[in-house]
Image (spheres, rainbow, N blue to C red):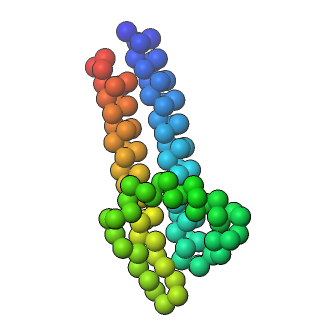
Amino acid sequence: MDLQNNQNANKYHFWSLIIKYTNGFLELLLLIRVILKFLNASSEAPIVKLIYFISNFLIAPFKSIFSNIYLNNNMLDMVAISAIAGYLILTLIILKFLQIIFLRRNM
């Protein structure tokens, strides 16, 4: 039984790391988007265009939750900020399910 528990703990650790690193990458991408939007970065620059293109898919489910906030000539991208919060919550829920599946099954 200890071998089974150890294998389940290893599986949980493996999958939780994948999920955490994936979430970290996505959240970093969204944070970069927020900063670029706030600083009025040119959307014609290739790297900015790429970041906006990729992050548009990530923010799509959150588009109509909040309106963006405009401060003078700068924009605070509330859609991307709500996506950051939403993906964090989703990640925590997935990690909890993994914990239930892999670690609590044999208790």
Q: Residue furthest top?
A: 1
Counting from the top left corner in percent of width and height, residue 90 is at 37, 46
Q: Which residue lies furthest to the bottom in this view?
A: 72
Counting from the top left corner in percent of width and height, residue 72 is at 49, 90
Left or right of 96 on screen, residue 57: right
- Where does the C terminus fall, quadrant-wise? top left
Left or right of 33 on screen, residue 43: right
Give the vertical position of 15 relative to 42 (above or below). Answer: above
Q: Foreground: 64 or 71?
A: 64
Q: Which residue lies furthest to the left in this view?
A: 107
Counting from the top left corner in percent of width and height, residue 50 is at 64, 59
Give the vertical position of 69 relative to 78 (above or below). Answer: below
Task: Residue at 34% x, 25% y: name it.
Answer: 101
Place residue 61 in its image quadrant: bottom left
Q: Residue furthest right?
A: 46
- Count of numbered circles on the image: 0
Task: Residue at 58% x, 62% y: name it.
Answer: 52
Task: Residue at 53% x, 52% y: name it.
Answer: 26
